Amino acid sequence: MVPNLIHPVPVELEQLSTASTFYDEDAREPVQQVARATKVTLSGQVSWGEDEGLQMEATGRAETATGYVLFRRIDLAAVAVTIRINDRFTKLGGIVTNVYVVRLQWLGHYPDQGGPTLLKAWFQDRSQVEREVV
């Protein structure tokens, strides 16, 4: 059994490209801006709305999220995409965005599927710019 998404929309994803990014060898961090791979369009279920309030972790305040996109694992595998923290969603349905993945959560564990069937990618709007609807 593979769960279905409710009202899926096209989601444009730009992934980090560590191979194309120039790094400062001493600081071990990107110089200027990280390089991004080609955009990939996926099918996902989008939910806008703040994550639960202030949460603390052992290292301090946890990142809050602006919302999440739910993906089916089989859809991600079909296009050979592995979503990672700091990947960017540039379009959620008909809304042009600039939001970044801040947390990943596996869901829908079924024995006949060998584990999780869904991936919830929590995102955060870091730029706080006005969103454009196309």
Image (cartoon, helix red, strand yellow):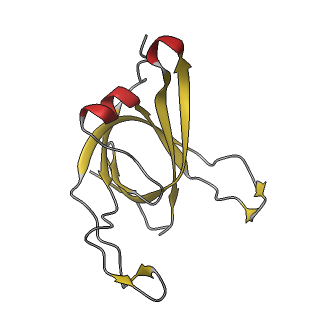
Residue displayed at 76% across by 54% down: 55
**Which quadrant of the structure image shows residue 31?**
bottom left
In front of the other: 99 or 73: 73
Residue displayed at 35% across by 73% down: 34
What residue occupies the far left of the structure in this picture? 38
The answer to whether 99 appears left or right of 34 in the picture is right
**Which quadrant of the structure image shows residue 43?**
top left
In this view, 100 is above or below 83: below
Residue displayed at 33% across by 67% down: 18
Position in image of residue 13 (x %, y %): 32, 51
Number of marks drawn: 0
In front of the other: 118 or 48: 118
The answer to whether 100 appears left or right of 95 in the picture is right
Position in image of residue 26 (x %, y %): 46, 89
In front of the other: 80 or 26: 26
**Which quadrant of the structure image shows residue 30?**
bottom left
The quarter of the image holding the N terminus is: top left
Position in image of residue 65 (x %, y %): 59, 53
